Image (tube, rainbow, N blue to C red):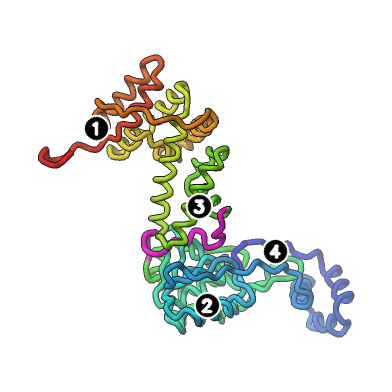
Amino acid sequence: MAADGVRARGFGGGLRAWGLCMGLLAGAACAALTASGTSPGALSRTLSLRLEDRFRTRPPAPEARITLGPHGRDVRLAGEIGEGTAARLAVLLAAHPEVARIHLTSEGGLVEEATAIGDLVAARGLATYVPDYCVSACTLAFVRGSARYLVTNGRLGFHAPYDPGLFGQVVQADAAPERAAYVAAGVDPAFADEALGVASDDLWIPDAARLIEARVVTEGVETDRFPDSTLDDDPSPAGARAAILRALPLLEALSGRDDILTAMAARYLDDYRAGLTEFEALDRLRARAQADIARVLRGADDATWVEIGRLLLRAMRQAEPETCLAIGGEGDLLLAHDMLQPPAQDDAARVLLARAAGQGSDADPPARSGQAPRDCAGLIAAYVRALARPGSGASLRALARTRIRPAQEASALPR
């Protein structure tokens, strides 16, 4: 089983298949393939499978990564499930009896290996957790968990098993063993039938409600539940850098400030290795990113700050009051960028940040505004007034450093 969804490219006709058959297999073996009136199409598929089995022409996939989490309670498996994956997992589990859970991030792979992984999971009573995606053969391991967790917006994908051919064919295989495995794990038989009825070159990704109803998943979880798995497939500095750019695309505007991105990626990698949850790691990343962005913006010239002020004002007008105060009172360009994304697809924040990054050294922070309003409507009005005056860059810098807090509900509370 696989998740790449590559469609069969076919094979060019019965005569060509017969010629290859005679050229590559013994005459008797070739004759046996056609003794019962095999059609040209069936002949080419059968020949393709025989040749693939003989010559092993498919390039081997990189080995799946199998690592122990920082607290010794989680195992992380990421990548294609290939030959020997289950044996490597067995060695790690034998050395660490305290493991209680396995994270699965995989596009699938060999059915036999996935089934063997499932046997290990069941024998140890491990819980299974999908922090991103687990499709095709991977689901055979997932359903064996004593508890089966799927992160919000995570994906489980299903289709019928297939055999790969020499010429790129996807030859659908008998799904009875996989159906039996799903049902034995407690999956609703009707769901198993539907999942395995999906064509081998297609992929069905049911929603979480359906997966829970069918007893595939026992619980949906948020990203604050388990240790972060976003770097399971590549826990290197380069992998961390790619991850922070995926999480916060605005940071691409700092491509010319390698010092900032390198330091930010290193801290993100440290948080991953420390076992923080994905929620905690992303929260820390956002805080660091906003602090670094604020330092870069301090070096922007007045003309750029006028445009930054206009952008912040647009975002404030679309935001809830608390978010509005953070955008305008802290000059949070990252939050403004998020607010102005789809459906507007606003990319002005990235352009302005890149411009500021190229305008020189980070400047000292301006003095905070001491007379800024304490509510969103008043702050919006202050931005409007500042933008109406010529040379308003300095005023906008000060407004973006007010750090306004919402008014206290009781005057006796400390300010």
The reply to whether the C-beta atoms of the residues labelled 4 and 2 are less than 8 Å apart is no
Real-space CA distance between mark 2 and mark 3, rounded to the nearest whole angstrom: 27 Å
Q: Indicate whether 207 appears above or below 311.
A: below
* Residue type beneath disc 1: Asp
The reply to whether the C-beta atoms of the residues labelled 4 and 1 are less than 8 Å apart is no
* Structural crowding at the residue carrying mark 3, measured as other residues with C-alpha within 10 Å and reported as few (<14), some (14–19) or many (≥20): some
Residue range corresponding to the magenta coloring: 220-237
Answer with the quarter of the image where residue 207 lies. Answer: bottom left
Q: Which residue is mark 2?
A: 92
- Residue 174: image tag: none
* Image quadrant occupied by the C terminus: top left
Dot 4 lies on which element? loop
Dot 3 lies on which element? helix
Closer to the chain start, of discs 3 and 4, is 4
- 370 relative position to 343: left or right: left
Q: Which residue is mark 3?
A: 266
- 44 relative position to 74: left or right: right
Which of the pair 64/179 is nearer the observer?
64
Closer to the chain start, of discs 1 and 2, is 2
For the view shown, which residue lies furthest in the left direction? 412
Query: Which label sits in the foreground, 3 or 4?
Result: 3
Which residue does the image show at 55% across and 62% down from the upper left? 233
Real-space CA distance between mark 4 and mark 2, rounded to the nearest whole angstrom: 38 Å
For the view shown, which residue lies furthest in the top direction? 390
- 369 relative position to 186: left or right: left
Which residue does the image show at 83% across and 83% down from the upper left? 29
* Residue type beneath disc 3: Ala
* Residue type beneath disc 4: Ala
Q: Which residue is mark 4?
A: 8
* Structural crowding at the residue carrying mark 1, measured as other residues with C-alpha within 10 Å and reported as few (<14), some (14–19) or many (≥20): some
Q: Indicate whether 336 appears above or below 177.
A: above
